[in-house]
Image: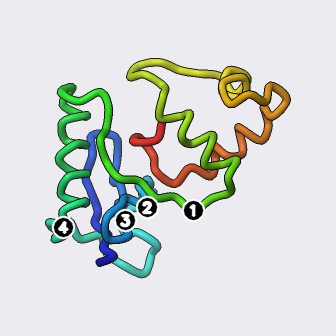
Amino acid sequence: MHESVYYNSPIGILLIKNSGNAITEVSFVDKLTGTGTEEIIFQQPSSTILKKCIAQLDDYFSGKLFQFNLNLAQKGTAFQQQVWNELLNIRYGRTVSYLSLSKRIGNEKAIRAVGTANKKNNIAIIVP
């Protein structure tokens, strides 16, 4: 079952979507009215994966969780998937440059492509 919910995080409102058994999107909502045609309504999710995601986000923001354990599913090229998987290896509280990421995936010259893949990451916070 596909479902989406809004989550009121300490750093802003997030829209969380799933594909039934995996999280497909965690994105920041810019306005309290969503896209301008809908009002944001905070409601409890019915799917297990969204409940688990919200529980882990709650623990993350309260300082109890430093690594997420969720099924994730983003659509993207093989290269984008490789970059996103490497992003998951960034430890809590650390930053990594695009150059460092490109070296980690074995393609030092792919700095700009790594940056573009990072920009296309649809799962904020969980995929840093």
Residue 35 pos. (x, y %): 46, 72
Q: Verify CB contact (< 8 Å) between mark 4 and mark 1.
A: no
Q: CA distance from mark 3 to mark 4?
A: 10 Å
Q: Earlier in the sequence, mark 2 or mark 1?
A: 2
Please give the name of the residue rendered at 29% of the width and 62% of the height, measured from the top-left corner: 6
Q: Verify CB contact (< 8 Å) between mark 2 and mark 3.
A: yes
**Residue carrying label 1:** 75
Count numbered badges in the picture: 4
Q: Earlier in the sequence, mark 2 or mark 4?
A: 2
In the displayed structure, 44 sits above or below 38; it is above
Q: Earlier in the sequence, mark 3 or mark 1?
A: 3
**Residue carrying label 3:** 17
10 Å crowding of disc 4: few (<14), some (14-19), many (20+): some
Q: Residue furthest right?
A: 109
**Residue carrying label 4:** 45
Q: Amino acid at mark 1?
A: Lys
Quadrant of image for the N terminus: bottom left
In the displayed structure, 84 sits above or below 16; it is above
10 Å crowding of disc 2: few (<14), some (14-19), many (20+): many
Q: CA distance from mark 2 to mark 3?
A: 6 Å
In the displayed structure, 5 sits above or below 72; it is below
Residue 15, by quadrant, is bottom left
10 Å crowding of disc 1: few (<14), some (14-19), many (20+): few
Residue 24's disc is 2
